[in-house]
Image: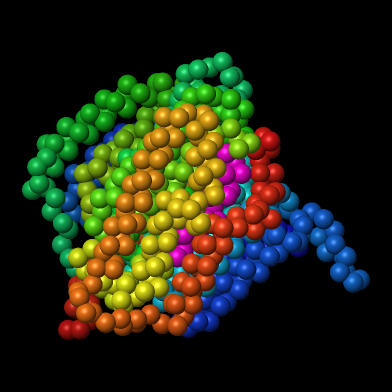
């Protein structure tokens, strides 16, 4: 049963991570990020008790909410990066496909390396890391950079949960995810400083 | 009494209390005073030893349990804490002169406490988590909420964040290697992970492009603080890895890798510094070269390399403090720190211009200055191991010297008949004056600092013995 849930979570990760890569609207990105954390929670459950896995999903949702609330307070439109070659939808899909192929090839080996964590767990984790890195390489937008870093760290957390079950590590990682979201929110506000100042002066 | 509470929890809590304060002088005195007090306690009050003060018996415990794990400050780590808090006090006392006290004092104290926690946490590889938390806290320190962040800050965040997973996974793999040392594939995988993690953390070539960007975009004094603290603790953390794993310690490939990385950083840092036309970027490449010197020290026989590594730390701290304060003052009087705008600044900010020149020369191992004794010892040790490597180190040093003389030419190149109009405040002149005296003191009498450094290698179980 758990294995089935794990593979469903992997499918959800494929959808959310590719969706994050293609989404142009920040609202869709935040929703996809929140769903991605549910998938991450499911995969963490294979190696963690419910309580500790819940910490991860709650911190992830709180981070997504922080980013969403900050972004909603800004009136600037999303930066359209689609016009710049080679960043079109087809290119992104092609790159995501390449990541998928690499992950499919690497997952069995990494699975062996990581104390037989489980193929589904390893695949989901590597997909998140790969897609996060790809996303990071394609964007300079602060919200997207933050989401990419959170995606990479989610992938790492799934993998690390299989080998390290320390409460301290779980707590510190949750703090880091929340901190990353706060830093992302801070940078978004700073990036829109001129706009905020203009609005205030009006 | 508990050591982690004294050197980690208390400074962090005190810093939170300082957050609402806005008075530059009060913040500078409170932050600097606390850092000096913590340094003195670390140096002179032994940990895990009962002391009788009148009728009271006082003992500082070394361990604090947190969520099933422990923060342990070993009795042998006292001198290191003294060094860290002592050097941090340079920045906190200088904060008033740089007019950055409301940002650097509270956040700097918390970051310092987190970096100390990274040394104290057991198992030690969890240090990567504390370093990441310090990095996240550095972002509000480096950028203002009222100006858009530059690319350097974003890259700093990305690169430092990417380091954490690599180091944590490498730490886990290293345990496997320790259990089955014959598994060469696993050893190669863990070494690669570890190398990548430290390459990101220490900004090793070619992952250092954010350093010059950061120096261009951010307040130099704050960037200088972070570029001192983060790499210094990371190097000690890295040395801890080498100390902990015997196969890593005895690996000849590690020595080659460390030597190559160190030389690459010194040579590229020195040569790039020589061709810069921006005073901030010159400091950035100087910092990169300094990290290279520290990595190079780790590649030597540990009985020689570890004392040199610890001798490099105070010199680096003092040089960067003087350098970054000088740049902050120059930035006050010019539009940018480009050579074009900084011409003749010697007549407006003579102390700052002198500070820049002496700090650059100190980094370039110029005789009589703080960087000279450690780098001379490093050069000598390196020449015994490999003459070619020593030659390359010389190339890097020549590059740094060229950058120092180019800076001297630019800051003194005023229009004819331009009068001297010093605009530095008394506090700025005092701080820079003290810093410059310190640079000479450490250069001429390096044995004065030996009192603090003598016992530092004892913090390692195997290295330096």
Tell me if residue B461 can be seen: yes
Residue B114, percent from left and from top = 55, 57
Task: State the image quarter where residue A157 is shown.
Answer: top left
Asked whether B160 falls inside the magenta stretch, the response is no
Does the image show residue A31?
Answer: no
With B429 as the anchor, is B348 left or right in this view? left
Q: Outermost residue toward the front? A: B417
Name the residue rendered at 52%, 67% in the picture. Answer: B437
Q: Quadrant of the C terminus of chain B?
A: top right
Left or right: residue A141 versus residue B451 is left
- The part of the image, by quadrant, that contains residue A98 is top left
Picture coordinates of residue B176, whole percent (x, y)? 57, 25
Q: Is residue B41 above or below residue B289?
A: below
The quadrant holding residue B56 is bottom right
Q: Residue at x 53, y 30 (%)?
A: B384
Please name whichever residue, B394 or B80, is drawn nearer the observer in this view of the structure: B394
Q: Which residues are magenta?
A: B305-324
Residue A185 in percent (x, y) is at 33, 62
Q: Which residue is farthest right?
A: B55
Q: Residue at x 21, y 79 (%)?
A: B417
Residue at the far top in the pictured view: B182
């Amino acid at each position: 049963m758990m294995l089935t849930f794990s593979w469903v979570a992997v499918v959800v990760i494929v959808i959310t991570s590719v969706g994050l890569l293609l989404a142009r609207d920040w609202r869709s990105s935040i929703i996809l990020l929140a769903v991605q954390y549910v998938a991450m929670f499911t995969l963490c459950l294979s190696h963690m008790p419910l309580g500790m896995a819940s910490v991860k999903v709650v911190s992830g949702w709180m981070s997504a909410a922080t980013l969403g609330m900050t972004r909603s307070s800004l009136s600037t439109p999303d930066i359209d990066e689609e016009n710049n070659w080679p960043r079109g939808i087809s290119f992104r899909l092609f790159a995501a496909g390449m990541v998928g192929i690499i992950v499919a090839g690497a997952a069995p080996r990494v699975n062996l390396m990581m104390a037989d964590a489980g193929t589904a767990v390893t695949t989901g984790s590597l997909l998140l890391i790969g897609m996060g890195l790809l996303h990071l390489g394609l964007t300079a937008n602060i919200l997207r950079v933050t989401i990419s870093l959170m995606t990479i760290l989610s992938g790492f957390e799934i993998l690390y949960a299989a080998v390290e079950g320390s409460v301290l590590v779980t707590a510190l990682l949750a703090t880091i995810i929340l901190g990353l979201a706060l830093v992302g929110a801070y940078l978004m506000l700073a990036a829109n400083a001129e706009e905020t100042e203009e609005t205030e002066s009006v | 009494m508990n050591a982690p509470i004294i050197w980690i929890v208390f400074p962090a809590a005190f810093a939170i209390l300082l957050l609402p304060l806005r008075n530059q002088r009060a913040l500078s005195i409170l932050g600097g005073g606390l850092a000096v007090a913590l340094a003195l306690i670390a140096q002179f009050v032994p940990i895990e030893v009962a002391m009788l003060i009148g009728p009271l018996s006082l003992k500082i415990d070394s361990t604090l349990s947190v969520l099933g794990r422990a923060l342990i400050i070993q009795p042998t780590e006292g001198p290191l804490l003294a060094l860290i808090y002592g050097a941090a006090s340079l920045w906190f006392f200088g904060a008033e002169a740089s007019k950055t006290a409301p940002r650097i004092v509270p956040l700097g104290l918390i970051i310092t406490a987190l970096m100390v926690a990274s040394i104290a946490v057991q198992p030690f590889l969890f240090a990567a988590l504390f370093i990441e938390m310090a990095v996240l806290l550095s972002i509000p320190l480096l950028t203002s909420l009222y100006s858009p962040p530059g690319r350097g800050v974003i890259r700093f965040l990305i690169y430092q964040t990417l380091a954490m997973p690599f180091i944590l996974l490498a730490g886990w793999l290293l345990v496997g290697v320790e259990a089955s040392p014959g598994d060469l594939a696993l050893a190669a995988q863990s070494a690669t992970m570890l190398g990548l993690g430290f390459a990101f953390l220490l900004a090793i070539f070619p992952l250092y492009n954010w350093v010059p960007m950061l120096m261009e975009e951010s307040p130099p004094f704050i960037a200088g603080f972070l570029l001192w603290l983060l790499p210094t603790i990371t190097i000690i953390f890295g040395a801890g890895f080498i100390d902990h794993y015997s196969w890593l310690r005895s690996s000849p490939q590690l020595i080659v890798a460390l030597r190559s990385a160190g030389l690459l950083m010194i040579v590229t840092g020195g040569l790039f510094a020589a061709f810069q036309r921006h005073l901030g970027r010159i400091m950035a490449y100087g910092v990169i070269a300094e990290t290279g010197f520290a990595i190079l020290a780790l590649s030597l026989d540990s009985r020689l390399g570890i004392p040199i590594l610890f001798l490099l730390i105070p010199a680096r701290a003092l040089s960067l403090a003087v350098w970054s304060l000088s740049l902050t003052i120059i930035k006050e009087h010019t539009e940018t720190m480009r050579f074009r705008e900084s011409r003749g600044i010697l007549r407006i900010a003579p102390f700052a211009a002198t500070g820049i020149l002496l700090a650059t020369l100190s980094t370039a191992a110029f005789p009589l200055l703080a960087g000279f004794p450690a780098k001379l010892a490093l050069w000598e040790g390196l020449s015994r191991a490999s003459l070619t490597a020593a030659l390359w180190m010389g190339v890097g040093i020549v590059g740094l010297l060229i950058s120092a003389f180019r800076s001297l030419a630019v800051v003194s190149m005023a229009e004819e008949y331009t009068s001297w109009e010093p605009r530095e405040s008394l506090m700025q002149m005092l701080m820079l004056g003290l810093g410059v005296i310190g640079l000479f003191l450490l250069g001429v009498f390096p044995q004065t600092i030996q009192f603090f450094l003598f016992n530092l290698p004892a913090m390692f179980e195997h290295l330096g013995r």
